[in-house]
Image (cartoon, coloured by chain):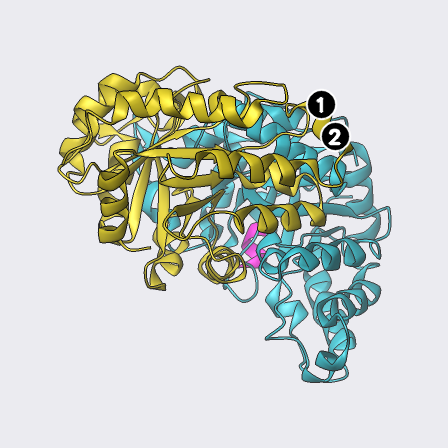
Chain colours: A yellow, B cyan
Amino acid sequence: MDYTRLVSEIKHKKSNLCIGLDTDIKKIPEFLLKEQDPVYIFNREIIQATSDLCVAYKPNMAFYECMGPRGWETLVKSMDWVPDNIFTIADAKRGDIGNTSLMYAKTFFETYDFDAVTISPYMGEDSVTPFLGYQDKWVIVLGLTSNKGSADFQRLECEGKPLYQHVLEKVSSWGNPGNMMFVTGATHASDFAGLRVILPEHFFLVPGVGAQGGDLHTILESGQNQDSGLLINVSRDILYASNNKDFAEAARNKALSYLSVMESKIPV
Amino acid sequence: MDYTRLVSEIKHKKSNLCIGLDTDIKKIPEFLLKEQDPVYIFNREIIQATSDLCVAYKPNMAFYECMGPRGWETLVKSMDWVPDNIFTIADAKRGDIGNTSLMYAKTFFETYDFDAVTISPYMGEDSVTPFLGYQDKWVIVLGLTSNKGSADFQRLECEGKPLYQHVLEKVSSWGNPGNMMFVTGATHASDFAGLRVILPEHFFLVPGVGAQGGDLHTILESGQNQDSGLLINVSRDILYASNNKDFAEAARNKALSYLSVMESKIPV
């Protein structure tokens, strides 16, 4: 999906909601466990109940990998239910030397046909650029993450500014706002105005709203640009809104509660 | 595998050779392509021809992931040929928030039963510690990598020393030399004496010898401690030593040429 289409979907739906499909078999309703592939059934119901409300789905690879080879089949079957007008993100946080990054690009853009993949910047330019050779595909690079450990290295002062700022500035010079986004965690809501000054045009993928406690109002007010420029990810808070037969309806209602905040704040 | 056993294997075999199973279907001998699972057959032959010479195998996940779900089956079948006295490393370079890192630990230590997994330090402590709760399992954290892009951030001067030095010092405080190693690339051979001063007791996993051009002699002389403390990885130079029917024998001969350098330099 290209930049224009993504912005158009956000403005049309008045939503920058991304739903994180971090589906944990230990957390889904118990009655699903009698199914042959409970995670797939859960995902299918969640997608059908929410795909008119969100603009992106972001399955986290760890939750599928841990099930062995059949976990990847569950992922493929689940993503088949995602409509074509929705942006898809493989949350994989890969990153390796050039010839290996090329293999990861092939994995997520060809074998699995995602629109985007998340990657770690630690290994530098030749670990990132192999992902940029695909038309209408995106890399989403870790900038300032939502977890407590983000303070360990990302905020280290390097030559006058924190490491994450070096990452945003340098990595953004290798691509453009049409093939590159950055992960900037919602748990640092007060940083968003500054982040938008550093990168006025790029999309930010924002995890950490919901279970991790990030402040949605502040981020929408200080983090958007004229095209919105935000994808706000919510995982657990929507997926596990109910643990009963009504789990999909409860997920929809929870998604609607996020949309009620977003709809008045998305630029027209 | 625990620390004592690993050191014992290195001293017994007079080898710190790790063979990287970065098996690319485009690079294996053409006559194998008529097999149902050419990558598996290739790996099986390579392992049978070299397992008395090396102390570790390190398959790179990207090369299996890109084949889809059946790629993981190829990986499992291949690793079944690795004898029990050999250390196994999933080269995955994962790293995510705590609840996701737990899933990755489960993936590589339970679902696939590797001894070790490589991870990226960018997300900090809670992305690393979930891997440390397993008896006799290891994390191998990226320190100073072998690629050109390692200069982009890893060598950035932060509060008086390069970022990679902060990483080695801080990350090592979260574990111990019996459950944690660091990736330090062979393409920085002149840095090894300094790396050994920072971390006298930890193992270093050293990629970049062979196709990437790292200097084996210098690294063995300046990077070892009394237990050796090095796993030297070679991938392409051994795997693709010949493109004909004799590929396994050629791989063995290439491995022997590395051992001829190592055997006199491994501490007794």
| Whole-percent x, y for residue B194 in the image | 47, 38
Q: Quadrant of residue A203?
A: top left
Q: Is residue B216 magenta?
A: yes
Assess whether mark 1 and mark 2 are in contact (beta carbons under 8 angstroms). Answer: yes
Residue beneath label 2, please? A33
Of the residues shown, which amino acid type is indicated by label 2? Leu
Residue B152 in sight here: yes
- Label 1 secondary element: helix
Residue B154 in sight here: no
> What residue do we see at 85% from left, 46% from top?
B85
Towards the viewer: A164 or B97: B97
Towards the viewer: B186 or A220: A220
Distance, label 2 to label 1, CA atoms, is 6 Å
Label 1: few (<14), some (14–19) or many (≥20) C-alpha neighbours in 10 Å: few
| Whole-percent x, y for residue A249 in the image | 51, 25
Up the image or down, A149 lies above or below B256; here it is: above
Mark 2, chain letter? Answer: A
Q: Is residue B7 magenta?
A: no
| Whole-percent x, y for residue A120 in the image | 42, 42
- Label 2 secondary element: helix
Residue beneath label 1, please? A30
Determine whether, in the image, residue B226 is placed left or right of residue A268.
Answer: right
The number of numbered discs placed on residues in the rendered structure image is 2
Mark 1, chain letter? Answer: A
Prevailing secondary structure of the magenta residues: helix
Towards the viewer: B24 or A218: A218
Q: Which residues are magenta?
A: B214-219
**Where's the N terminus of chain A, which quadrant?**
bottom left
> What residue do we see at 69% from left, 36% from top?
A38
